[in-house]
Image (tube, grey):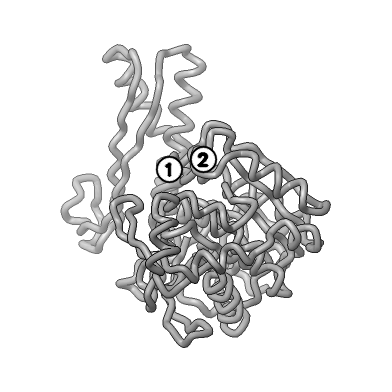
Amino acid sequence: MYSKKFQFKNKQGLLLEGSIDFPIDKKPLSYALFAHFFTGNKNFTAVRNISRALTHNRIAVMRFDFTGLGNSEGAFEDSNFSTNVNDLIAAAEYLADNYESPKIIIGHSLGGAAGVFAADKIVSIKAIVTIGAPSNPSHVEHLFEDHLEDIELDGEATFEISGRSFTIKRHFLEDLSSKNMRKLLQESRKPILVLHSPQDKIVAIQNAREIYTAAHHPKSFISLNGANHLLTNKEDSFYVGAVLASWVRRYVKFNEEPELQTDKQTVVRIGKTNYSTEIVARSHSILADEPKKYGGKDSGVTPYELLLASLGSCTAITLRMYANRKKWDLDEVLVHLEHFKQHAEDCISCEESPAKIDKFVRTIELKGDLTSKEQQRLLEIANRCPVHRTLENKIEIETILR
């Protein structure tokens, strides 16, 4: 995943800070907009985990801090639910102007409700996803219900959430009470995915039922059994991202590129972006690149690291095959590799001129109930792996212009 920070202005002219998470090859098939939970921020762990899962599926994700939160300008006490919705609309406009209009909107908790309202105004949105969302924005009032009377009498009140102080003003409550999410869902015809945990203690599961009942088909519900409201278990948030990525493909038309193909064994492609390189072998694809200090983007392994990986993987597979055949108790093989140049005169086995030669150092770690004799035999077998033998052979490379 590659992330790019940015700032954009909302309708009040305030600068909001965000990040766009891109697939590692920086070629997303679609864009999603993420709305975080009440008083949260764009860098909350669950948000980043869901985003990472989506980028693995080539969906870019824009996440940002609402007005007065995180690194965004403005005062939280001057914001309300409507300003959050307007912030989402402004974020979508930024994406449209600088990249591509978002087709997916994802909202966590109150952000889910905000996403439903924003989707009604953002024409490009083709699919809505709510995670632990309330069926009505006013549900958030329970977080500061002990202060409702003070807000009504004094116009505002300060309370704590997760050790941080927040001030709520009367206009916030008035704005919440004016929103009818059920009516909006009944009028919407956009596909919606509702994800909710039966064990959610912040927003009860009946909210998911109410959202699902109000919405029109196509609609889907996924139970996040065992998860808490904030998805603090990373397995839960990665699961949400993986399910979401699969679900949206039914309802969102992706900008599919022609697949990289070849009639040979492997094909490699590089464009104008230094030095990200696509590699495809059969149905498998990986990226190669150079470190930033050499002018690359560090979006993948280097060519020499690929060479080391080839030797290491071949070594490990060869040892696994041999141990299986012998029925030895080999639990795990780790192959640690290094590559460097050294002068030929330092190499005992070399009798040629003092030019530099390539040297690979392979350190093998064997785990399991093995005897010393079995371990020694496996080290001998490592030298027989096909890639090892290929590297020791005299190699001829023929280059043809196609």
x and y percentages locating residue 317 in the rendered image: 48, 32
Q: Which mark is residue 278?
A: none
> What is the CA distance from the residue labelled 1 to the residue labelled 2?
8 Å
Residue located 34% across and 71% down the image: 292
Residue that badge 2 annotates = 236
Residue 148: percent from the left, percent from the top?
A: 44, 56
- The x, y position of residue 52, in whole percent, is 50, 55
Q: Say what secondary structure mark 2 lies in.
A: helix
Badge 1: residue crowd in 10 Å (few <14, some 14–19, many ≥20): few
Q: Nearer the viewer, residue 229 or 391?
A: 229
Residue visible at 59% across and 34% down in the picture:
198
Considering the image in quadrants, where does the C terminus appear?
A: bottom right
User: Is the Cβ of the residue at disc 1 closer than 8 Å to that at disc 2?
Assistant: yes
Q: Secondary structure at mark 1?
A: loop
Residue 119 visible in the picture: yes
Identify which amino acid the numbered label 2 is placed on: Asp
